[in-house]
Structures are given as C-alpha cells and as structure tokens.
Amino acid sequence: MMDVRSVAGQVFVLQVALVVLLVVAAVVALVLQSRHDTGREARNRSVAVAQSYANAPGIKAALARRDPSAVLQPLTEVGRKAAGVDFIVIMDTNGIRYTHPIPDRIGKRFVGTIEPSLNGQVFTERVHGPLGYEEQAVVPVKGNDGKVLGLVSAGLKVNNVTSVVDRQLPIIFGTGAAALLVATGGTALVTRRLRRQTHGLDPAEMARMYEHHDAVLHAVREGVLIVAADHRLLLANDEARRLLSLPADAEGRAVSELGLPHRMAELLVSGRAASDEVHLVGERLIAVNHQPTDRDGGPPGSVATLRDTTELRALTGKADSARKRLKLLYDAGVRIGTSLDVVRTCEELAEFAVPRFADFVTIDLVDPVLHGEEPTGSGADMRRTATSGIREDHPLYPLGRLIHFVPSTPQAWGFSSGQAVMEPDLTAFGGWQEQDPDRARRIVDFGIHSMITVPLRARGVVLGMASFWRAEKPEPFEEDDLSLAEELVARAAVSVDNARRYTREHTMAVTLQRSLLPRTLPDQTALDVAYRYLPAQAGVGGDWFDVIPLPGARVALVVGDVVGHGLHATATMGRLRTAINNFCTLDMPPDELLFHLDELVARIDQDEAQEGGGEAITGATCLYAIYDPVSRTCTAARAGHPPPAVVHPDGSVDFPELPSGPPLGLGGMPFETGELRLPEDSRLVLYTDGLIEDRDRDIDEGLELLRTALSGHPERTPEDTCDAVLEALMPDRPVDDIALIVARTHIVPEHQVAEWDVPSDPSAVARVRADVTRKLGEWEVDEDMVFTTELILSELITNAIRYATGPIRVRLLRDRSLICEVSDTSNTSPHLRRAATTDEGGRGLFLVAQFAERWGTRYIAEGKIIWTELPLQGGVRQIMPFDLEAEEL
C-alpha cells in the first residue's frame, strides 16, 4: 500500500491526475477531429459524385429530351447505390427535379440553394430535405457555350455521416482507456522506483536528511567532487572549491569548462580508478583518489576526494621525479593498447619504454597467450614476442625465440611468484647467467649492466614477463624505478589481456561462423557454382549463403546478411540459414518463403525484447532465387538485399530490377517475386553489400566496378569469375563480411523431358503407362526401374483421376535421377494413413513411398504436383517384409 504522505505517493497522485487530464483531452480532440473529417469526406464525396454526373457523356442530350426523367432516373439510382450516396438529383435551371430516390418527388422543386450553381459555381450546404437533414452539393451542367443547361445535386443524410463517427467512438474511447491504463502503469513503475530511491520518506524527513548531509559534507577538511556520467560536475563541497578555486556556478557545468589542469580534468571524466594521484593545481599539489560509482549497481559517474599535499614541495627533487613518472605513465596509457592485437600491444610497450625508461626492452609471453588462451604450465617456456633497443646489434635473445628459463633466472622466479625482480648489477652474476653463460658474458661485455623484470599480470593471471635493461645510462635501476616499471607493465598487461581475450573470442566466433556455413556444395546438375566467403578483419559478421537442391532438378540460391558483427550476428545467421533450409523442404515460392522468414525474425525479436536482454536482429536482408533448368527461368525475391548480376553468354552484364521488399523483421509490406529468363551458360552472381560498399566508395560506384569486373569474359569459369571479382573489388581492410556466389546455368535437354496430358478417365492409365514404358526404353532404363516407374505413375495418376478435377499432366525428367511428376488442379495433398488388415485398398501411396528414393508435394498456381525421384544407379529400393497397413486420402 502506497503512503500518500510520502514523496513518492504525492508524485504518483499528481502524475495520475495529469495523465487523466491529458488522456481525456486527447479523446475529446479525436472525437471532434473524427466528426470534422467525416463531414468533410461526405461533402467531398457529394461533390465528386455530382461532378461525375454533370460531366458524364449524354447528360446534355438527356436534358434536351422531352422526358429527361425516363432516361436519367434509372441511371441515377444505379449510380447512387454504386457511389455510396443517399441521393442524386438532376434538375433544370428552375430547380424542378428530373430524378429523386423517392419517385413522387420528381417534378417538384429542389430543396436547397441553386443560385451559386446557376452562376457556374459548385455549392455545398446542409439542408432539411425530403430525406431529412442532408449534406448536399450542387454542380452546374454546362453546354459547349458555357451556358448552364441544368443542375446535378448529390449528398448523404446527416445521420449516415454521423453514424460513421458513432461507429468509431468505441475504438476511440477504447484506445483512450488503453492509453490511460498504460500511462497509469508507467506512472506506477516510475513512482515505485522513486519510492525505492526515497525509501518512502515524507518531505519533512527528506529535508532533515539532506540538511544533515550538507552539514557533514561541508564540514570535512577534504575536498569532495561528484561527476555525472555526462561529465558534468554534480557536487563540490567547500573544501574542493577552495583547493581548486572553482567558480560559484561550477555545479552543473562540464568538467572541461572549470579551468582545471588538463590531466586532472581528464582523470575526472575517464572513469578509471586512481589512488593518491598527485596533480599540480596552481601552487598546490593535490592528491586525488578517484573511483567510479557504478561498480555495485550505483548510478553512473564517479566521485573524487582531494587532499592538499603542498608540503611535498619541500622535496623538490622527488616532486620533479614524480611528475616525470606520472607523465610517463600518462603517455603510456595513450600509446600502449591502441589495437586488439597481442603482439602489437607488446611491441607498443617495448617501443614506448625505449629510451624513456630503459635502453633495451624484451617481452616474453607463454605460447597459449599468443593464441588467445589462458597461460598453462609453469611458464618456464616463453616466446620472445617483442624487442626494442637503442641499437640493433644487441646480444639478447632474438625475436620469436622460444626460451626455456631456468629456475635461477629472474624471469622464471618472477613468473612463478608474480613479483617483480631487480638486478641492479648484472656484472655480479648473481644467478641470472645460468640461463646461458656465454650469452651472459656477451651481454655484460656489450655494456648492459642493470635489469628489471616484471610479470605481465592481469586479472590474477601472469601472461609473461617484461624485462628492462640499461646500458648507456650509467646509473643502475633503483627501488623507485622498480615501482615505476611495475605500474607501467600493469597498465600494459591489461591491454595485452584485452587483446588476448579478443583473440580468443574472435577465434571462437570465426569457428562458430564457419561451422554454420556450408562446408561443401550439394550434388546437382542445374548449376556450376563457385563461392567465396571472407570475414571482416574487425570481427565476424552475419553474412551467409546456401545452395539447396529442390525437386524437379531445380536449385535454390540464397544469400543474406545480418547487420552487425560478433557472436550474436553469427548465431542469428545460423538460425536464419536453418530456417530457410527447413522452409525449402516445403518447396515454397520465393515471396512466400521470405514472408515466413520475416515472421520468424519478428517473433525472435519479440521474444528477445520480452526477455529484456537480447539484441534485436531487425536489419537482416536476404535474396532467395530458384533456377529451373527445364523452363530456363529463375524466380527470385529479395528483402532489402542488393539485386543480383546476370552475365549473359555474350559477356554483357545487367542488374535486373527485381521487386524489393523491406528488410526482414519489419513486417507490414508484402514481398514480390520477379522472373528472369536465363539462356544456357549465363552466370548468375549473388553477393552481399560488403562486396560493393566500402568507406571509400558508395554503392553505385561499387556496382559499376562489379559490372566492369564481370563484363567481356564469357569464357571464365565460376571459380575464375570469383577471383576476378574479388581482385577488382576487395578492399584492403574489409569492414564487413563478403559473401559471393557465381552460378553458371545449364539446361535439361528436351530429349530428356517427356510430358503427357491425361484425360480424367481410368482407361487412360494403361495408355499413359505404355507411353512411359516406350520412353524409358528410349532412355535405356533397366527393366526393374521401368516396372517401378509404371507402378508409381499408375498409383499417382489413378489418385489424380479419382480425387482431383481439371486437367492432369505427367512429366518425366531424366537427370541425376529419374523424376516423375503428376500435376492436377486440386490443392489437397495425399498422405499416408493406416489401413486395416481387411481393407482391400489404401496401400498404394505407401508402396510409392517405399519404392521411391524421395517423394513429396509442391504447390503451384494451378494446383499441385506430386513428385518422386528414383535412382538411375544402384537399383530399386526393396520393400521390407512388414505389414503394409497404410491408407491414403
């Protein structure tokens, strides 16, 4: 129960009252607007109908007749009902009616104003006429000389006009009530959050709490700053204002506008944690502790506490050294970790530290880290990943060397303990030389005299070792240098670990992506297909392609693109590809398949939105095409996808304008199918937008480059075409995935196709069976296959004659298999059912299913086709010796 005395309760009451007023006002406005719009529509319809009759052919001749009513009355009654008006009245210039819905009103004077229309004007008004209150329009009928020959009036009864509004009132009031409920629910949620944040306190309690808060905040002798997520200063206590010399209106302004030193302003908006960082502000040295406020579910932003440490100025030398080191660490944060590449990040650390901090730097990582994995083993074996120095002829281990560090070396001990090690005097040979005594002597002779090695540690895991060496600088490393090296390496280690994790996730995503894409192309004879798939360098995406054999020797080509990158886009691609393969088993036309795919995407988006954490996948595009080698046609539909390219046998290229629907998931718009006629040896080129779009060129330029790459080379194979296209259009650093399919068309020769029209007469089955037997003999099909084909066609044709109507057609295709098709005009597909042991029939379709390698039904505009496929090689399938209890419908 909400306490109306609390702040949340009072806000809720005020918000609900305001919402009610707004909803009521909106409903009233909708009612008034609806009435106005409906009345205007009625007047416009009346004018349109009256003008149509006034300008109709023959109206002038009818007015000149001795009895115009005999001609005009039937016509106006038919037109009145067709136009949806209540009356159409034709009259002479004196207002005497020739027509009227009530016949006894013919010959009487028109009720209304006709003078403006006699002057050639169109006049509308509301009058009380024979039908009641009416909205009517009067239009003149003019002769060739411009003289008014008569008048035409059309209109609707007012109660018919207002009834439209009355029918809309329940919808308007229902919408208003729904809006009120939604708004009230939203207000309740906001109020609930406010109650949770204010802990149900009333205004007096909150005022007292904030008074205590202010008293404590401004009494402490430590500066406090609170910065919002948008980098505005939310709060500064008195001490902070004094230390930083903030203006009076500092609160609410951006941190960059407060006149703070650049480094300190950058820290306050960076969101990174800092402990006792020293910043010079004017004449003061300020120690800053900075922490983000959103770690444990708090509001986004950060809080900083400030302490005046100006007394450290007495230690001038130390302060200067600290400033230099802070500058070094700041510059390191900018220069190191600019990419998500493990090796490059190590190179940046080595290059940055020379010569600022050391004369030579070597970075050694365990091998699994280089592949994105967690480090394993003792770490004694590490690979030299990066080196940098003031000279190239140093005797240190070369780049790429796999080094086995012995336990006495600082690198091995530091890796196992996780602690930095300093060797201030290498010439003392305190155990580090046992790794390689000869190399150690050469290192000392070269002049390298001091070394620090620091573990690259991130998130509690040691990834490798960074070693700093001094040669030209005569002073050895000191304790302060050790702490600086640890801080420098700690910052770099986070970047190395981020790059390692990215490498691992990228590898996983690429592996997932490749597992979801086709591994091999299916066997089929309609198309010679070559493909290329190139993932973007920045990360895997959601492009995909498919080649799917369909019944009747047809082949479906699919290419699609899920906008975005990463595992979500890859997983979404896999879901869509799986869905398309499943839809293809139903043998849908392209537009219907895209419709179902669009519904699937919308349903997935809706489910993920309800869960509250999923990403929407709206933005997926797809092109689905079906090539038929018998008819030599390609039917295709696309959902927001670039059009295909067609390379004709003479080498010319065009981009057919297939109807384009919206991207998948938007809904509301139908998809349309286009049809292309493709001669033999044409090449159909399908691709994703990553091929033609790039940062340096737009889509039109990309299409022209594609046209140029495809033109003039009809002799190219699909493989050669893919290579030529990628060579011409492949960007240096692809920012999007590229999927490319090139398919060269073949046809089924006419001598491998046979068709028969079958009369709806059972006696025709024997004749067709004989024709089929002769044709199979011409094709040199073995006798077992002939018998099986006869059995299957007899069953299918008999079913069509018995249960279907209209023409029946039989088609045989000799392709990789023997395809038998029986088409009729019925939309009912036969299916298997159990037959009782005493039934005399009902097992024919079961036999078809047993003998055929595959069988099914596909629907066409004129009805359906029942198809079967029989292997031309390997013999006929044998029926297992079990009870053939099946019945077909």
Image: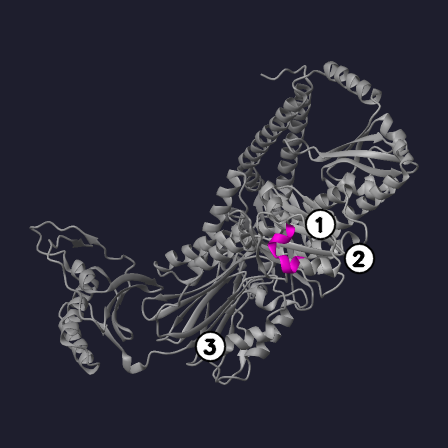
Q: Is residue 765 magenta?
A: no
Please give the name of the residue rendered at 36% of the width and 67% of the height, measured from the top-left corner. 549
555 or 808: nearer the eye? 555
Whether 289 is drawn above or below 519: the answer is above
Secondary element under disc 3, as helix, strand or loop, is: helix
Number of other residues with Cα within 10 Å of mark 3, as a class: few under 14, some 14 to 19, many 20 or more: many
Looking at the picture, how far across and down is residue 281, in whole percent?
88, 38
Q: Earlier in the sequence, mark 1 or mark 3?
A: 1
Q: Is residue 438 magenta?
A: yes
Say what amino acid the circle numbered 3 marks.
Answer: Pro
Q: Quadrant of the N terminus?
A: top right
Number of other residues with Cα within 10 Å of mark 2, as a class: few under 14, some 14 to 19, many 20 or more: some
Please give the name of the residue rendered at 46% of the width and 67% of the height, measured from the top-left corner. 636
Name, please, the residue furthest toward the right.
283
Circle number at residue 718: 3
The quadrant holding residue 577 is: bottom left
Asked if residue 341 can be seen in this view, the reply is no
Q: Which residues are magenta?
A: 432-440
Disc 1 target residue: 428
Secondary element under disc 2, as helix, strand or loop, is: loop
Name the dominant secondary structure of the magenta segment: helix
Please give the name of the residue rendered at 55% of the width and 81% of the height, measured from the top-left corner. 711
Say what amino acid the circle numbered 2 marks.
Answer: Glu
Disc 2 target residue: 472
Q: Quadrant of the C terminus?
A: bottom left
Looking at the picture, how far across and down is residue 219, in whole percent?
84, 20
Say what amino acid the circle numbered 1 marks.
Answer: Ala
252 or 870: nearer the eye? 252
